[in-house]
Image (cartoon, rainbow, N blue to C red):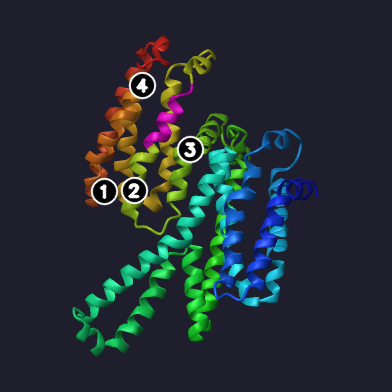
Amino acid sequence: MAPLKIEAHRLSVFVLIALVLTLITLLADVEISPVVPYIVLGFLLSSVFPVGLSYGLELILSKPLKRIELFAGFLLSHLLLALVVILPTLVKPMAFIYAIFAFPFLPMGYLTGLLLKNPRRTLLVGTLVFLILTFVPMGYIEMKVQNDAQKALGIETLADYEAKKAEYSVLIHALERKYGNYAFFSPGVQLELFSRDLASKDMSDAYLRVGITMGFTVLLLSLSLLIFLRFEPGDFLRPSIPAVYLRFLPWWVRKEVASLWASRAFFVFLMVLLLPVGRIMKAFFALFLLPMSVIELLSENPLLILSKPVKRTYLIRRFLVILGLFALFTPILGFSLPVVLFTVTVAFLTGLFSRKLALALLPFFALILSPALQEASLLVATLFMVLTPPFIALAYMRAVRMELSNWEGTG
């Protein structure tokens, strides 16, 4: 109840304004009125409600509350307030159904608030996201559909259009739904297609639009919950959730798991793995993101590590553990993985001289080696597996001779 009281008090003015706007448009006899609750609710969910996640959160998280319970409290509070806003639309059931398509903007707003950690930026970026995803994708789809349909049917003149008008209409209908499935991230597209399905009595596709919208909402909520569990006011949490449950592994392995989990580049790589793209495209992203993860790990001051009774080879052992963890992605990256590991090794060696230099040269390393991803085969993979150990040996020689006093400088 505490989050509900806090959010209800904070958002009472906005909820009241939204109620007034909704009532006015519903009582007015205008054609656009069913869409207005969607617009009003979408703005609240994407911009206004999520501000609470980036304002004063450090005071809440300093208390011994379970994060998942706190997230559930925010979510239920915002859903109840959203239902209050659209409650008058029950007078016009169509407006109520339209408003449901605005719900994906709530987890989008959560993601914006957690990543930006700034109330004003959350409000601004959330508004832009709402406007862009509501209006832009459908316009692009309509242009794309018309262009593809005209090319497929060979329509070049008005006479061609009149002769093939029926075929053109059927093809346009089919292409809109095909591209609408690709635009699952746009509630505006799904709402537009849903309204057209109702007009044409195509209820099976209408149910599909509702299913896509709800499925995307659940996916975004899961992602925002994952980030919230790792969120630290001002930064991301350093203690790693996976490392907590891997007690059977040696502590120095669990330390690298924790470091990778806290690496933003590695976290983005995990998100890339969920994208519906091919293996080569995922490997291309890995060429940039995995070396960046290693360079991020090098930012840890080794004076704190090496002040303990360990040898300088500890840095190399850390790196070998990271390579072993990256090797777990072999089923996903396939023969492209040795190319990625070679790039990671070169970046690590360069980072032992200068992290700034490693960051500057990383795009060149990745672009030079990216053609090898297209030719990924057993022969190419074997070649890069043979090339990697010599660079690890060079990194070892550098680690045992490097001047630690220059570590925090440019190398």
User: Does dot 2 land on a helix, a strand or a loop?
Assistant: helix
User: Is residue 273 left or right of 389 when viewed as pictured?
Assistant: right
Kind of residue at disc 4: Leu
Question: What residue would you read off at disc 3?
Answer: 264
Q: CA distance from mark 4 to mark 3?
A: 20 Å
User: Does dot 4 land on a helix, a strand or a loop?
Assistant: helix
User: Does dot 3 land on a helix, a strand or a loop?
Assistant: helix
Residue range (magenta): 291-300
Residue 248 visible in the shown view: no
Please identify the dominant SS of the magenta region.
Answer: helix
Please name whichever residue, 151 or 135, is drawn nearer the observer in this view of the structure: 135
Question: What residue would you read off at disc 4?
Answer: 352
Quadrant position of residue 345: top left
Q: CA distance from mark 1 to mark 3?
A: 24 Å
Q: CA distance from mark 4 to mark 1?
A: 26 Å
- Counting residues from the start of the chain, the first of labels 2 and 4 encountered is 2
Kind of residue at disc 3: Arg
Disc 4 and disc 1 in contact, CB within 8 angstroms = no
Question: What residue would you read off at disc 1?
Answer: 373
Residue 279 visible in the shown view: yes
Disc 1 and disc 2 in contact, CB within 8 angstroms = yes
Residue drawn where x is 70% and y is 36% of the image: 61
Q: Looking at the picture, how far across and down is residue 369, in whole percent?
A: 24, 41
User: Does dot 1 land on a helix, a strand or a loop?
Assistant: helix
Question: What residue would you read off at disc 2?
Answer: 283
Residue drawn where x is 38% and y is 11% of the image: 403
- Counting residues from the start of the chain, the first of labels 3 and 2 encountered is 3
Kind of residue at disc 1: Leu
